[in-house]
Amino acid sequence: MIRLIGYFFGIGTALALLVAGAVALYIASLSKDLPDYEVLANYEPPVTTRIHASDGSLMAEYAHERRLYLPIQAIPDRVKAAFLSAEDKNFYHHPGIDPTGLARAVITNIQNMGSGRRQVGASTITQQVAKNFLLTSDQTYERKIKEMVLSFRIEQAYSKDRILELYLNEIFFGLGAYGIAGAALTYFDKSVSELTVSEAAYLAALPKGPSNYHPFRHTERALERRNWVLDQMVENDYISSDEASRAKAEGLGVKPRRGGTYLFAGEYFTEEVRREISARYGQTALYEGGLSVRTTLDPEMQRVARKAMQAGLMKYDTLRGFRGPVTTIDVSGDWGVPLAEVKGLDDVPEWTLAVVLESGASGLRIGLKPARQVSGEIVAERVEATVSREDMSFAMRHVVDGKTLKANSPADVFKPGDVIFVEKREDADGAYRLRQLPEVSGGMIAMDPHTGRVLAMVGGFSYSQSEFNRATQAMRQPGSAFKPIVYAAALDNGYTPASVIMDGPITIQSGNTTWSPKNYDGRAAGPSTLRSGIERSRNLMTVRLANDMGMKLVAEYAERFGVYDKLAPYLPMSLGSGETTVMRMVSAYAIMANGGRSIKPSLIDRIQDRYGKTVFRHDDRGCEGCNATEWQNQPEPELIDNAEQVLDPMTAYQITSMMVGVVQRGTATSVAELGRHIAGKTGTTNDEKDAWFIGYTPNLVVGLYMGHDKPRSLGRGATGGGLAAPIFKDFVRTVVEGRPNVDFKAPEGMHFVSIDRKTGMQATQGQPGTIMEAFKPGTGPADSYWVIGMGEDGSSGYGEALSPQASQAIQSGGGGLY
């Protein structure tokens, strides 16, 4: 019997060895094709690119996978404990696979055979790292064996903390979030260090199946799974029973973080930065590179710019009457549902949509658009309010089929079902004002003239309405806002502010085409100084000046200032009939504001890669001595500005002084009410299609235009001084409040002489009609009266034959008016 038992034992042993050998050979064959686990050492997952304002405020995030990589040392113990309890409580003790958990899973799967239940797994965190990084998700035994082999090898090559770090930064949590840092922001708008025990437990519950535990679609299931994780944390001695009870009493508390931009009023600026990053580094770097971008945006200045621009556009628009409702809906039943479907303006939170429920002589009874919950469901509550007749007074003039009609009652304008925009009145409970999305638009830029840093940008009334950025993309005629370039070219080439030019009729001929420019008021002032010409924005003087010095010189300076890449040297271009952008015009004025040095406009201060290395910096000025370790009686370090001098500093001061006159005595006197040292120039194009104003203090340049996207007349009398300058004034009044009123500094060597405003001749200081004028060394008032543009026969005009190209330019423009 013993011999028989030994016989069977020998056979069993041989068979076991054969099976073991076969298994070993099978595993060895699978191991030949295993991926290289050493790639984990160079793990660089797709990471979110983050864009910040100059004060560090988060503006936007861009990512295909919303992930922020965190080293294990930055992840709190309570968060690690939640994931270990949910996924692999023996993680720090097993060699890569958990034999106990594996045996439990095998038994459970055998018991469930034929029941239709899904098989359970026993993957450790290490196995999940092997699968997620190196293998596919195929549900096969072959893949499982490979996963186990790789897990042993990974455990031998990397520390437990490194493996856990890879896992917590890679896993998918749902809602587009990858990694624990991205999940904390996406679900709770918090950093990982701010997560509560309850929140950490819920996030730890998600990797098993994010869609199964969706916080809104499957709330009960999500709570059940979170509470199970909390129980496991108690069982593993990570938290106490009391802590778990308090955490279970809390709701999920999920507050999803919205995508896109986060900084109020910064949408146009953010999108411009996104385009620049994409053009500079490519889409992959933008959406996966984990760049940290520090922009030049001043958030407070941006909010002020938005408010000033919107107020100016609304003021112009409401004076032209009400154009009708946004749309109409049926209010015979539950009006909240169809109203909730009407798209509003996400970036104009002061406004809300409403539907007219009743219209009468005293005003409107309206229903406000219901809010939506985070889940997307419409809140059931229906809120009603009123709009008084006084708060909708502009609608008493309403446009019907292109004609403006006067209404006697709100009932003549509105009917039940009309959907309108309203804004809540802060001084009256339950009362709202009627609002209307302006037809007119415009763009605005605020810039530091010394560095070119763009501090604020408004690309239109609403980014939700139109993503087209009118500050950088709209090509518009600058009109008379271009004239300072012409006058600067003259001052840089022998003319003085006291040079006298004929302000009189002029006719230019080209074949059968004639061009007879006119001043805005249709009158001519006769001989006048350059200063008078720019202060009063005289077209006839500007054309004569450009003709006298030559349009090739004007074109050269326009290109030197960056207003145009190439300007056709035709006289109509001297009046700003060529198209350019607000950004280019503001950059050109910045040159005049900073003493004639060139600047590079920039929206970005610095870009760092995912490791914190600076890969771009806008400010490339050198500073010898800035990094001195101690003071040894050496002079203070100075920034070395290597910017090109594109305009004589004295010329820059002269043209600035002349534009100060525009504000004090000329076409922008409304700006003088600020009581500040401000230089600026208005601009109005042919047929009043665009209204411009660009102005500056010694430390800030601001430029804007107002006009229709499809250019058409803004109406007779709609000038830069009347429309654009007040917007500039409202903006500057707020942003300079509390700051010193710094004057423009005259360059050393400049001398001042009292001259007669009309003749440009030297006069006795203090006598009527005189002004102190700035002159360069070696120049001064003329000794004899001389008028540029006066013919030898004493005539005040002349003719000149032009090329066919110039003739075409004449027919298409003749831009600046006022």
Image (cartoon, helix red, strand yellow):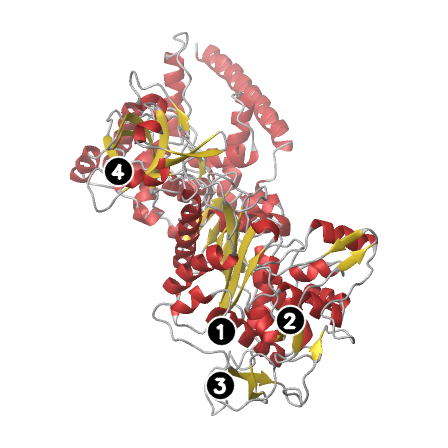
Disc 4 to disc 3: CB gap under 8 Å? no
Q: Amino acid at mark 2?
A: Tyr
Identify which residue is drawn at 53% across, 15% down: 11
Instruction: Look at the picture and state if 531 lies above or below 112.
Output: below
| Crowd tier of the residue under label 3, counting other residues whose Cα lies within 10 Å: few below 14, some 14–19, many 20 or above | few
Q: Amino acid at mark 4?
A: Ser
Instruction: Look at the picture and state if 789 lies above or below 718.
Output: below
SS class, disc 2: helix
Q: Amino acid at mark 3?
A: Glu
Mark 1 and mark 2 lie on one chain; the one further toward the N terminus is 2
Residue underneath mark 4? 198
Between the C-alphas of marks 2 and 4, the distance is: 69 Å
Q: Is residue 763 left or right of residue 223?
A: right
Between the C-alphas of marks 4 and 3, the distance is: 55 Å
Mark 2 and mark 4 lie on one chain; the one further toward the N terminus is 4
Judged by depth in the image, the label closer to the viewer, 2 or 4, is: 2
Q: Looking at the figure, which quarter contains the C terminus?
A: bottom right
Mark carried by residue 487: 2
How far across and how far down the image is residue 554, in percent?
71, 67
